[in-house]
Image: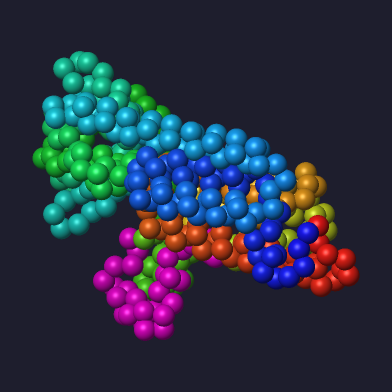
Amino acid sequence: MFYTYNELFFHLPWHPFYSATAGILCGIGWYVNVPLGLALSLCAFCIHVFFRIPAWYVAGLCFLGGMALGIFRAQQQENRYLRACAATQQKLTIEGTITNITTDETGQATTILITSAQAKKQARSALNGWSLTIRHPINQALQIGQQLRWENLFLRPPSLEHSFSNYCLQKNHLGSVKTTELPRPLPLRPTLSFEQYWSTLRAKIVDHIARYTDTETVLLIRSIVLGDKTALQESTIDYRSQFQYWGISHYLARSGLHISTIIFLVVFICSLIIPNHTMRIILAMIFSILFSLVSWNSVSYLRALSFVLILFLGTLRKRSTHALVIFSIVTSLTLLQAPHVLLALDFQLSFLLSGVLLWYTQINFFTSLANTNSAPIR
């Protein structure tokens, strides 16, 4: 029971997901960076002291379980990186799917997702699933989603330096290698893949927009609406300077604010033409997924998208949704999928700011609830 605003700040309703998420954060923090793990543990301890927790043993079990799971995932990812390093430093035959292509004056850089690797006809399965950037002579025939093979590709082992290995684990990337040989397409594979289809559709959308606007507007739409970080090049340096002068440079980087605004507009438009509430929610979910497939995604965007989809699922099932609980679920799933993203600045700023805003929103909610009821909140 609490009567004042100060008591309300620390006595928000407790949920086991809070403790589990705090345990995952602390477990990953202790494994990848001891000072960070210590700081997170102190924060978790203070929060659990101030929370009005009805059953401490439940909170303790959830925290310890989350901590063990976080340490296990971080160790699993690091061992995966070490096995990949051990499989390099030799000539390899690598097959993979193109995920990104960039071209400049010096040549072409093709990023592939490795599907198989061999050295002297022996499989190197430890390299499967990693991304690798290969610089080679320009080949305009390459397309995203295409299956390629490089032979006699000498891959040096990535650095075992702590900061570099953490970066590779965050990006699931083994670095880059340079070769003078062109890749060999794999004709036996399907001519059209899932990635290639959406990449082609994305290019068609950009080309269609370019027909009715100028080049600078297209680049701004690609960066702000579609989330292409490479769109802001020298041709838009004036825009970047103006945005910096106005103090709104963060608008150039697509974040959860953009997807939230777009989904709000979609739901609002659907409410005007579709009377059924369930159909409006389903259409908004479908639009959100399709929009993410035709755009370039980031950590903050995926966080907002996951949050909205879980919120919509709860609405469809007619269940009451709690914003902080959903946020805890999204945070846990993000960390378990890529534990070392905890060290990334964009993850820290995005999730910390979102968590504080959600906490403040809940405080305002319970404050208004306390003002409308004469009895104290329990």
Q: Residue at x 26, y 18 (%)?
A: 123
- Name the quadrant of the N terminus: bottom right
Viewer-proximal residue, 350 or 93?
350
The chosen color scheme is rainbow
Can residue 224 be seen at all in this image of the molecule?
Answer: yes
Viewer-proximal residue, 263 or 362?
362
Query: Which secondary structure class fits the magenta region best?
Result: helix
Let me know if residue 158 is in the magenta part.
no
Q: Is residue 67 above or below residue 128?
A: below
Horizontal and vertical percent position of residue 19: 59, 44
Horizontal and vertical percent position of residue 365: 73, 66
Can residue 142 be seen at all in this image of the molecule?
Answer: no
Q: Please tell me in which quadrant of the rendered image residue 339 appears.
A: top left
Horizontal and vertical percent position of residue 126: 30, 25
Let me know if residue 252 is in the magenta part.
yes
Q: Is residue 346 above or below residue 113?
A: below
Q: Residue at x 43, y 35 (%)?
A: 71
Give the magenta-colored segment's residue range.
230-258
Q: Residue at x 43, y 57 (%)?
A: 348
